[in-house]
Amino acid sequence: MKYVIVAMMLCGLGCASIHHHGHFRGAVAADHVVASQAGVEILRRGGNAIDAAVATSCTLAVTDPFSCGLGGGGFMVVVLPDGQAAAVDYRETAPEGVIANWYVGQSATASRYGGSAVGVPGTVAGLWAAHQRWGVLPWEACLEPAIRAAVGGVEVGGPWLQAVEWVASVRKEHPDLHSTSQWVWTQLCGSGLLERGDIVRQPQLASLLHMIAADGPSAFYEGVVASDIVSTVQSAQGVLTRSDLHRYKADWATPIVSAVVLDRYTMVSMPPPSSGGIAMQQIVGLIDRRMNDIGVARPESPAWWHLLTEAMRDAFADRARYGADGAVVAVPVEEMLDSGRLDRAAAAIPLDAARASAHAGIMPPPDDAGTSHFCVYTSDGMAVSCTETINLLFGSLLAVPEWGIVLNNEMDDFSTSPGVANAFSLIQSDRNAPAPGKRPLSSMSPTIVLENGRVRLLAGASGGPRIISGTLQVMLNVLLFGMSPVDAVAADRLHHQWMPDVVQFEQAWVDGTVIESLEAMGHATKRRPTVGKVQLIEVLQSGEIIPASDPRKEGAPAGW
């Protein structure tokens, strides 16, 4: 499969399922209704999709501090009204003091919690870069909804309480992290006493947002804020320096555009260090080549789920072998998406039996992660798909008290020790070993689907490696099975990531026949709470804009 490269920017997902349907001029689908409304507020004030994206992202830092924020990074893909496309890579980077094998011999938690887990944050730089190129409203106007939310407070919901439970479990298992996690535990977790409906205010974060609104990224990467970030990280055994912050730059990247699949669609996705764009294009390419061999693809068909599982197995195996920061290590993208190679891989898929992956006995990954996705679309044809992260829930558990910044633990996304799995049970090659200034491999998969050159879908998700499988299945639910957006995001999903060699069905999965059939084919199966939390916007041929948010994360879209 030959692939074409185009310039584009991405969006993200993760929300709850409130369905909006109407002839909107613009819509936002995000993990939290307040963030979706923030984006729509900016659209009403004359902003474009980029302005709305800045507002949505900064507000998510307030509403979902356990998922994303100024202490993290992300990927953004954008399609402009004239059809031009570009991508912004503001993934976190390894500090200059981190070298290969840096974590070998350190504690098992060194890459996950505390200062040594923190990568150089990229969110502020990435949003600024996008706004400087395409924004139409003043920068400071785009931050007003987030500042208002931080001052007035946001209501605690189920996802926040689940994150509190996660922090409590980590603190119980690792008492040595009590000091590291103290600010997060007391200020954002209420010392474990938060209840649904409680209001959490973040005055320190509001002050920082005010400064960034006035002075741009220099307020974050220079001066007193930078000094406080460095002091916090170094006091917790990290090596981040002011020089690391000063040097950080968001990168303009070139998205990968698939060959035509399913007769008329192309997928526009993020290049490495994202692994999701390549993986989803591989999976769709493999499915496209074998669907006719299983009869009519239907969501109730065990043959369909078997084919999808085997395609996932192949794509995730390639992810493990080749995934890395393409700016540092050569990633054979063209080879991985080569039509002849996909032909051979598709032909090798048995349609009546599971193949075996090498299996390692690894603990199951956390159900969700510190990641959030949102999508923005406006009727002039401008589309933004954006996924942002701090990695695990509440990231490194380390925060900068003076400014309310929850710091990422993105260093765990590197291959920190040979043959050792990360928090998501992913074993990766030494191509993904840490190095100064390098960006770790990511499953974030902001995606835009085109039909005859026109935006058809925007999608993305949170949930670690299940971002890839969740995003893909929701898109296929719409494009292949004709589901409405709200039904597409609510439908049951499964996941397979090559290793561990097990098909993970969502806990709510109803159709036991499918599970029994896959087991009869030789698949090992287990249940897990969810497979990704997806945000979606569909654009009909008529121009109607239909946003939907995943009920698994209690978000909701908004339209104008």
Image (tube, rainbow, N blue to C red):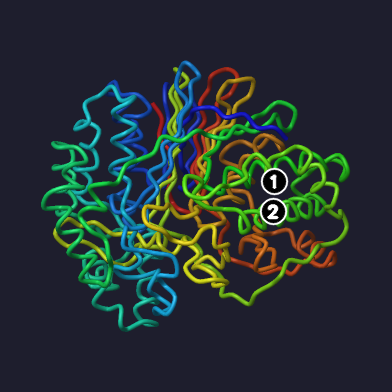
Horizontal relation, residue 11 to residue 521: left or right: left
Picture quarter containing residue 342? top right
Q: Is residue 110 or residue 530 the one in the foreground?
A: 110
Which badge, 2 or 1, is on the more N-terminal residue? 1
Residue 371, percent from left and from top: 42, 53
Of all residues, the one furthest to the left in this rendering is 224
Question: Vertical placement of 201 versus 108: above or below?
Answer: above
Q: Where is mark 2, residue-wise?
A: 312
Picture quarter containing residue 377? top left
Label 1 Cα crowd, 10 Å radius (few <14 / some 14-19 / many 20+):
many
Q: Where is mark 1, residue-wise?
A: 283
Question: Vertical placement of 437 versus 144: above or below?
Answer: below
Q: Is residue 216 or residue 31 the one in the foreground?
A: 216
Identify the residue at horizontal 65%, vertical 41% (top origin): 281
Identify the residue at horizontal 46%, vertical 42% (top origin): 12
Identify the residue at horizontal 58%, vertical 62% (top origin): 429
Residue 439, percent from left and from top: 43, 52
Question: Vertical placement of 542 versus 548: above or below?
Answer: above
SS of the residue under disc 1 = helix
Q: Amino acid at mark 1?
A: Ile
Query: In which quadrant of the rendered image does the N terminus lie?
Result: top right
Residue 275 appearing in the image? yes
* Inter-mark Cα distance, 2 to 1: 6 Å
Residue 273 appearing in the image? no
Identify the residue at horizontal 44%, vertical 23% (top origin): 382
Query: In which quadrant of the rendered image does the C terminus lie?
Result: top left
